[in-house]
Amino acid sequence: MDAETLAVFRAETEGLVETLEERLLALQATPEDRELIDGVFRDLHTLKGTGAMFGREDIAGFLHDFESAFEAVRSGAAEVDAPLVAISLRARDHVAALLEAEGAPGGEAILADLARHLGKEAGAEEGFALDLGEPPPAAGAGPWQLTFKLPADTLVLGGKPELVLAELRELGATRLRARIRDVPPLPLLDAAELHLGWEVELPAEVSEDAIRDVFLFHEQGLELTLARAEGAPPPAQPAPETSISPAEPAPEGPTAAAQPRPAPAAPPSAAEPRDASAAAPAAKPSAHMRVPAERLDDMMDRVGELVLAEARLVDIVARSGDPSLVAVTEDIQRLTAAMRDTTMSIRMTPISTITGRFRRLVHDLTSKLGKRIAFVAEGEETELDKTVVERLTEPLMHIIRNAADHGLEEPSGRAAAGKEETGTITLSARYSGAEVLISLSDDGRGLNREAIRARATARGLLGEGAEPADEELFGLIFAPGFSTAAEVTELSGRGVGMDVVKRTIDGLRGAIEVTSRPGEGTSVTLRLPLTLAIIDGLLIEVAGERFVLPLAAVDEIVELPEALAEPGARGNAFLDIRDSLVPFLRLRQLLQSSGVPGPHQKVIVVTSADGRVGLVVDRIIGSNQTVIKQLSPLHAGVKTFSGATILGDGAVALILDVPQLVARGRLEADGREAA
Amino acid sequence: MTRTVLVVDDSPSVRQMISNTLKGAGYAVVTAEDGQAALDLTKTMRPDAVITDQNMPRLDGLSFVRAFRAAPQNKGVPVVFCSTESQASVKEEARAAGAIGWMVKPFDQQKLLGVMSKLVSA
Amino acid sequence: MSKHTPARHGMDLAGDMVTFRLSGEVLAVPAAQLREVLEPVQTTRVPGAPQFVSGLVNVRGSVVPLADLRVPLRMPHPGGAEVSRDAADDARILVLELPLAGQASVVGVLADSVHEVTRLAPEALEEIPAVGTRWPPRYVAALGRWAGEFVTIPDLPAIFADFLAGEAGNSHRPGEAGNSHRPGAPAAGPHTDAEG
């Protein structure tokens, strides 16, 4: 098996496992949806068949009973109920585990549960194994006498009698004779039908299976007799069952293989329209192609390099001034930009690729918490860069867990509050400019303003007697170590988590907003950039070192007044910009740079979660297309950078993470004040 | 003369596996991801043999074969089902629809090539 | 090969090794891990990063962290952080492929000079004694002899795994961890002072 085919296999089975989960979860809500049932069956069937083709008996064998269970549902002999879905979801997880590690344990218990559920004993049905064993040839038997007549429709169906005869010859056939007695009189002759029969003798040592194998595709309607020739030493055992004596068959004597043809078995009429209705929705994925994610990353890297090379080219051409070179360079710039946009659009992935996991999570939480929870997803088709989507999964799961655990009330509590007993968690996604907004809303009890304030004050996150606006106060639940849950539950952990959510979103250059109304619910909105791979950057210099700031964060650039050039004097950490005071941070300090700044420092005013903040730099070099390269895990502890990029001269420059930088600067400023 | 085999299966990996095997043995291969795609394809070309899966979205194997057989130009083109199902009733249904034979999944390369040698003269 | 646990015996010491010099000592790493040897290139300082991995370099279009083994091995530091600029003409960067947090990663390792690819005779390899060596014993996979000198084979998987777990090279102050440092015993809890 070549690596490429295996890669296709992996991508395909992973996709199947995903859609299977989505369909099972959807089936829970609408257990009679024929399309879903067909879909689940098809997923199971394809997983089993594909697994078997790739020698994965562990997968194929395991799925056999599940396929049968859904076959029964499909044919109307059984119904979908919650336990069947639950067991099937476990089976789906087990298949995912098998795909990770061949022969992973745990399947027996699931099969036993399925069998119990279906009301039969596990292992009663062996089913799947293909019997390849051959019976031992009868020792000392004589040569075979074979008489056969192929089905009349052989030619129509594309059967090739000459190939049958050729195969028999290969087995050593002799004394081949055609029998024409069944050929009808000419007026009745249909040229498309086959009426010839043959007689042939085959050597004794050829096995019966080998002979029957020749007729593999002609079993239906085949007339065949096979017997040991006379004069052969009497077989020690009775002659093979299938042989018929005497060798000459009665003209229309049906042989063992030639069973009466069943009436063309039309499927139950109810099945027909179903096929047709299934056609429309299933047509969706047909024009798509699965590509290993690494190839997309590679492609993005190449485009990144192209953008970098283009930057160098533009630099050189600008100095040469050769008009024909300028024209070609403009073409290349245009193509590069188009290439970049196309590549980025290929990387765009709909949110729906991860909502399946959320449905699953809510399903699991429902039983764990003893609450009734519905999950609704809106705008699932909204697309984000695949890296963003991948990294969003964990934070979103965390927010959902929190909503289910703390936000939604028990059914009794909801009833008492005059709400429906089933709480709803809604995920909605939509575009907003170059951003995507993803909201997770619940219709639970809402955040407890006073509890948050008390906790924040106790934790020193809020001054005594402070009266923050809702937005500011609710934002504090993302502060490290903050948690208002009185008791620590198994699910939402111990106050770690929400700060991790914040960090992840910050890392994606996104922002979080929280709104909440008592008794009505809470809504957490994430604002995320559409893409992460290439950004417009502002190249700056601090103490001879170059850094990149995301241009999207930059509001304006002003000169640092001479009076403020030197750090030190107290009370001067503000700039007066058009009559508003803007606090500023010196990057030289934050970046632990050495040396003394020159006279003309610049202030880059950025918008952060806490309003406008100035960042003091030595020099602005200019804007550039910044290809973001992730930092190594070895630098995971360094929070002030969201990545690195390679500049036109080949040097590496770090990309400043503005929210982290501002937060850190604030921290240091507080530290200085306290000292 | 190169013989062309149409491979119909909704599983890309199975398609690729069968294609590789057949191509390795000197056949030309055309693939379709379901019965409907296969049917559309056969309006523009006539394969020397067809290998089809049964369970597929849009148009399943049986329906595909029925429609395929209904077109006069496809007379004499052998169709083989390959499926994990092996009950006699399904095989009979396939035969009635116009398939010449049935191959039970899983099968290995040798088996596949053996089957092809029964269907297509070299 | 090794997982990212400090499994020193998992290292393949029987194959070809690359020997190099660092702070006057001869070290060796499996040649199978070596991708290339670079002459010193422009290094970008990472403000706030631990001294062990204080820089980044561009290796054929990839951003690669540059590690200084002198930190975890507690070797003397002649040039402080300005290593690459002070380095002599012989200085090189060994570009190694290592598993980091379970992922194959590329890491640059500083060397004062690179000698040769050689095979260390198995009989020339010794298990390191638990006491009496200059190096933190848990970071040394084996000691050997080459061209009449001692060769130290650092346990890179252990060094990097410990660093990622927040234990190893972040200590800037030598002697902090002392000689009584027993493998696995102290500092097992989650460390959150990585930023400090």
Image (spheres, coloured by chain):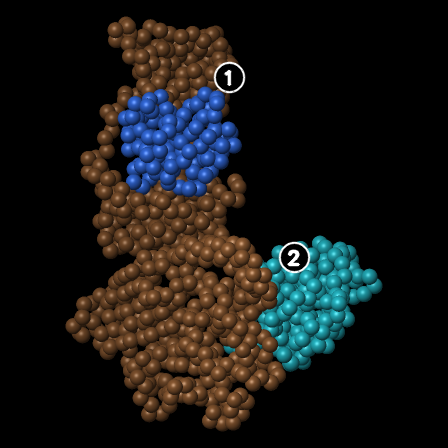
Residue that numbered label 1 is attached to:
A170
Give the quadrant of residue A501.
bottom left
Q: Is residue A1 left or right of residue C37?
A: left
Chain letter, colour blue: B
Colour used to depict chain C in the structure image: cyan
Chain letter, colour brown: A
Give percent across and percent down for residue A268.
21, 35
- Res A294 seen here: no
Element class at badge 1:
helix
Residue that numbered label 2 is attached to:
C35
Element class at badge 2:
strand
In the image, A340 versus C15, the foreground residue is A340
Q: Is residue A567 above or below residue A310?
A: below
What residue do we see at 74% from left, 63% from top? C114
Give percent across and percent down for residue B114.
47, 26
What's under tag 2, amino acid-wise? Arg
